[in-house]
Image (spheres, rainbow, N blue to C red):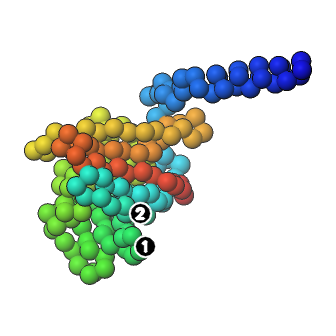
Amino acid sequence: MKISNKIFLIASLCTIFSCSANNDFQIVDSQKNVQIEDLEKNFQRVIGSGTLNGLGKSNFTSSFIFESDNKSSMIVFKDFLGRRNYMIEANDEEIRYLNVRKKIEISENEFNNFFPLSSSIDSSFYKYILWGDPKILNQMNITLENAYIVSTKLISIDGSNYLNEIVFSLNNEKQTYSMKFNKRNFK
């Protein structure tokens, strides 16, 4: 009988502690944020993958692959069957949009149907987010007719904070776009 009371007490304490407040929120030390300048000293390029999700009026999931070096960045978005669909090429101050399946360059307005924020993002934004440097978010100048909210998540790798997810909430959260980076490989 004494053993069952001890087991009951231990089980009760485990239940109480597991139901207590979850401390998922952590204070982020911005001094540990990765900086693209430091990464470029050690690596020639970064390649990786992620997903772009749209929720709201436009619901979709598009996986993407990317590559970036000190001169250019490229993101290739795939459709639900895994076929390459759209591509962004960003060089210095120029951004090109391509329909990969049709093998044609498309206008910024046409690409905006897929990702409406693209016309408000400059070429350096793509490079910084692909390398994982969150500093670009402080310099963002997105001008939209409707209200927007930008939120981010960072991931700590080897003591440095990398940008892991960016969420754009538009029209009072009636439409949300999130870019999540699943993998980055520096070479």
Query: Considering only vertical position in the picture, is 36 above or below 63?
Result: above
The answer to whether residue 170 is left or right of residue 128 is left
Q: Residue at x 52, y 30 (%)?
A: 24
The answer to whether residue 79 is left or right of residue 11 is left
Mark earlier in primary sequence (1, 2): 2
- Give the amino acid at mark 1: Gly
Image quadrant assignment for residue 93: bottom left
> Which residue was labeled with disc 1?
82
Residue 155 x, y percent position in the rendering: 50, 40
The local secondary structure at tag 2 comes to strand
Does the rendering let one see residue 127? Answer: no
Q: Which mark is residue 118?
A: none
Asked if the residues shown at circle 1 and circle 2 are in contact, with their CB atoms under 8 angstroms apart, the answer is: yes
The local secondary structure at tag 1 comes to loop
- Give the amino acid at mark 2: Ser
Q: Residue furthest front?
A: 1
Residue 126 x, y percent position in the rendering: 32, 52
Q: Residue at x 36, y 45 (%)?
A: 166
Residue 146 x, y percent position in the rendering: 13, 43
Query: Considering only vertical position in the picture, is 180 above or below 2?
Result: below
Quadrant into which the N terminus falls:
top right
Mark 1 is surrounded, within 10 Å at the Cα level, by few (under 14), some (14 to 19) or many (20 or more) other residues, namely few
Residue 29 x, y percent position in the rendering: 48, 26
Query: Disc 1 and disc 2: Cα gap in Å?
Result: 8 Å
> Which residue was labeled with disc 2?
63
